[in-house]
Amino acid sequence: MSVTGISANRQELLQIADAVAREKSIDKEIVIEAIEEAIQKAARARYGAEHDIRVTIDPKTGETTILRVVTVVADDMEEINEYAHKRLSEAVRDDKDAVLGTTYEEILPPFEFGRVQTQTARQVVTGKVREAERERQFEEFKDRTGEIVNGVAKRVEYGNVIVDLGRGEGIMRRDQSIPREAFQVGDRVRSYIYDVRRETKGPQIMLSRAHGGFMAKLFAQEVPEVYDGVIEIRAVARDPGSRAKMAVISNDSSIDPVGACVGMRGSRVQAVVAELQGEKIDIIQWSGDEATFLVNALAPAEVTKVVMDEEAGRVEVVVPDEQLSLAIGRRGQNVRRGPGFRAPSARVRRAHRPLPGGAGRRRGHRPADGHRGLRHGGRRRLRGTVRDRRHRRLRRGHRRGNPGPRPRIPRQGSRRIRRPPPRARGRRRGA
């Protein structure tokens, strides 16, 4: 029985389902099932929620049928729905072939949708379509983890960038972007998918430009040997926007992995540096021997000795005195990014440690008599005069937040107001 009173005829119903399926990139059958569920919910509100009402739509002709179904149940069933169930003994009286599970269908007449039914049907269809769209996004992007995608910045919220990927939306959080890099709405964004999560509000496609895999994939696009698998990128450590280290190895002895990644006059590595906003990249040779690899990782500093404690899981690297600052790097970048490939607990120290009481001694430490740290009489120079000590106390109090002694008040008439001197906050250590 055709339901012509449900706000759309057969052809319009199929056209609506086809248009929504193309717009949301989902199957047409999912949209038709959503419409069937919406009509079913409206029919139960019209004829009664206690009825077992089912709706079917022919995907070829668009014919809609509303049925009320009655199911045969056992006689010993305690609670039954008289509108949806029928006991076996009663069913046998009317139909001798009736058995448990037999269903009887009754076609219901069509009806016009009211305002409430229309609103309910719209909510049901919208919810089902949105759920199908989210499921489609998750299934499409879950296997693309570890790929580089291109998109357009759609929104920028508190440093987080919402990127339109065409068939979905990804989010690049503030800590996953390169420092001092600001995107505006409409900018092209090239990012790396490092995770796809299924959440209540829909799949979350997590994007990053600070991930180590982003730099590795950029080299795979620029270096054919990396793309073909002849050269492997074994480890990547980054300080986004500042410096990065990458360890490579070649499966072909005739190909230099470092030279292939650098390219002719640095053309290949410069293309990656430009994408990473000028981030400096150190490419080193991978080695299976951990000590050799640490020596390569701390380049250009010269390593004198590597001491490994396998039980404690610590590594100590010894460098010459003049190479210590070079091995540590600016703000400790070389230490944090170099040994971090394989031994994050590596410790760098110089070959000759300072003697106690020499240069670099602790604050408050008093050298012994005759030490070269004492000049012009030693103790007298260390102790100083009373005036010098008082001056140092005042300066020490100023550093602690005390601005020093209060200014003296000039004469007022014939009297002069005197204030007691401020109390010293402490005596100098070792005085």
Image (cartoon, rainbow, N blue to C red):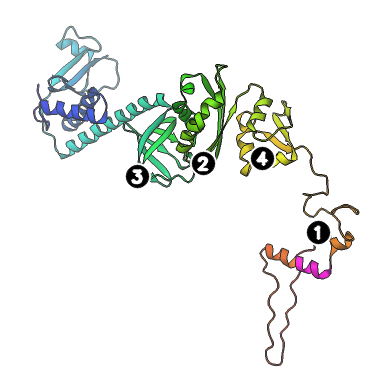
Mark 3 and mark 4 in contact? Answer it, CB < 8 Å.
Answer: no
Report which residue position mark 2 lands on. 241
Among the two numbered marks 2 and 1 on one chain, the one whose residue lies closer to the N terminus: 2
Q: What residue do we see at 83% from left, 44% from top?
A: 355
Instruction: Give the camera-side residue of 66 and 24.
Output: 24
Q: Quadrant of residue 351?
A: top right
Q: Quadrant of residue 396?
A: bottom right
Instruction: Name the front one of labels 4 and 2.
Output: 4
Mark 1 neighbour class, 10 Å CA radius: few under 14, some 14 to 19, many 20 or more: few
Mark seen at residue 429? 1
Mark seen at residue 185? 3
- Residue 391: x %, y % from top left: 76, 68
Mark 1 and mark 3 in contact? Answer it, CB < 8 Å.
Answer: no
- Residue 92: x %, y % from top left: 18, 10
Instruction: Name the front one of labels 3 and 2.
Output: 2
Instruction: Give the camera-side residue of 53 and 180.
Output: 180
Image side of residue 269 versus residue 4, left or right: right
